[in-house]
Amino acid sequence: MRSDQEIRDLLRSWVLTKAPELSADGLTDRTPLFEERHLRSVHLPELLLLLERLRAAPIEVEDLRPGDFRDIHTMVDRFGGAGVTP
Amino acid sequence: MKRAAAGAAGSERLAALHGIGLSWQPSGQAALRGPLLRLAEECDRAFVRLASLWDAEEERHPASLPAERLQQVGYLRSFPHQATFVARLSPEEPNIDAFLTGPVMDEDGRVELSGLSPVTEVLTPAACYHLYSGHQGEVLDQALYLTTRNICFRQETHYVPLRRLSSFTMREIVCVGTAAETVAFLDRARTALDLFFGLIDLDLEWLTATDPFFRPEDNPRHLLQRVQPVKYEATYGGDLAIASVNRHHDHFGSGFGITRDGRAGDSSCLAFGLERWLFALTDRHGLDPASWPALEDAATTVLAKLRGGAE
C-alpha cells in the first residue's frame, strides 16, 4: 500500500497536469483546488478514480462530505492510508 | 393563527386560500387576485427594496430564451427533465389545415398537433439566465448588480398549490464580478435576509442544497456541488425553500463571455419564489390580511440597519 507521502506526490503531479496555469511553486498542499478553479467539475470523476487507485480501496460517493476535495492535504487526510478501513 | 397544519396544503387549506384570492389548476398553475395578489406584490416590492442595498438595476425580460443561449451554459444537458419548450405549429397553410380538420384536442385535453416548427426557444427556467445572456460579451470595470422578475417554467413530477408549480414567479438579485465581490454579495444577502426574517416573524433554516440535475449521479457538476456547496436555501417548515443564495463561480461568466478583472467573471444570485412566500406567510400568520407583517417596512428597516453599519 502506498504511503501518504506517495499519495500526496502523485496527487500533486496529477493536479499539475490538469491545471496548466498553476506552477509547481504555486501549488501547495493547502491550495484550494476547486475554490480557486484550478480544477473543474469535469475533473472530479477522474480524481475519484485516481484516489481509489492510489488508496487501493473504493470510495463511496454517498459518503462524500463538503470539503473532502478542498486541497491535497485534505484529500490525503480523508482518503490516504490512514483513512482506509480494512 | 400560528403554523397551520404541517405538510402539503390539503383541500381545506386550498378552499381557505381560494377565499383570499387563489385559483389553482391541478396542472400546476396558480392565479392570484384580491388579498393574495396584494401580498405577492408587497413581497416583490420588499425584495426590490432589499435589492437597493446594492443599487441593483431593474431589468425586464421576455418569457422565453433562445435554446442556443441556454445551451451555452449546458442547461439542456443538465436539466432536460425540467425544460419547457416553446412549440408552434409549422406555419404552412396545409399544415394548419391539417390541424383544423383534425379533432384539435382529444378527450383527455391533449392537443392533437399537426407538424411543428423547429423548437428553438425554451420558456424561462430561472429569471437570472436572461441577465447573464443579456450582458453577453461585456467587459466589466466594476461589479454589476441587477434584479429582475419573471415567470419561470419547470416540469415537475407533481404539483402542490403555492408550493410546487409548473409556472411560478421568481425575483432575483444578481452580482457579476470578481470572486471576492460575489462572495461579499452573498454574505450581505444572507445577513439582510436573516434580519428580514426576524422582523417579519418567519422561522427559516438555511440548508445546503444542490441543483436538480437530471440523473445527478452521472453529473460531475452535481458531485462538485455536494463536496463544495454553492447553494443554500432558506427553508420554511423543514421542506419548503422560499429563497436561496447561489454561487456560480465563473459558470455564467465563461458561458456568456462576461469578463471582470481580466478573466471570466464570477456570479452569484439571491432568488425568491413568490408563491412559496405566500404559502409560508399565510401558514405562519394566517389568512387575515390584518395579521400579515408589513413587508416593505421590514425591508426598509433592514436597509437602514445595514447601510447604517450595524451589519
Image (cartoon, coloured by chain):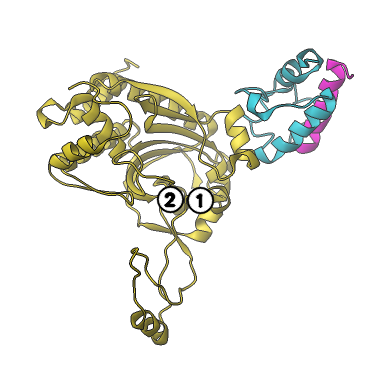
Chain colours: A cyan, B yellow
> What residue sits 39% from the left and 83% below the top?
B98
Q: Furthest-right residue in view? A: A1
> Looking at this view, is B93 or B160 the one in front?
B160
Residue A41 location (% of width, % of height): 65, 38
Q: Which residues, given as a range, are shown in magenta? A: A1-18
Q: Furthest-front residue in view? A: B107
Which amino acid, by three-letter code, is at mark 2?
Answer: Gln
* Dominant secondary structure, magenta: helix
> Looking at this view, is A17 or A43 the one in front?
A43
Residue labelled with disc 2? B155
Q: Are marks 2 and 1 on the same chain?
A: yes
Asked if residue B232 shows in the view, the reply is: yes
> What residue sits 20% from the left and 29% below the top?
B295
> What residue sits 72% from the left and 37% below the top?
A45
| SS for dot 1 | loop
Determine the image quadrant of residue B91: bottom left
Tell whether position A7 is magenta. Answer: yes
Q: Residues within 10 Å of mark 1 (few under 14, many from 20)?
A: some
Q: Chain of mark 2?
A: B
> Looking at this view, is B198 or B96 the one in front?
B96
Tell whether position A23 is magenta. Answer: no
Q: Which mark is residue B81?
A: 1
> What residue sits 56% from the left and 42% below the top?
B251
Q: Is residue B244 left or right of residue A13?
A: left
Q: Which mark is residue B167?
A: none
Residue B294 location (% of width, % of height): 17, 27
Determine the image quadrant of residue A71: top right
Position of B158 relative to B188 (above/below): below
Determine the image quadrant of residue A18: top right
| SS for dot 2 | loop
Residue B64 location (% of width, % of height): 40, 58
Q: Residues within 10 Å of mark 2 (few under 14, many from 20)?
A: some
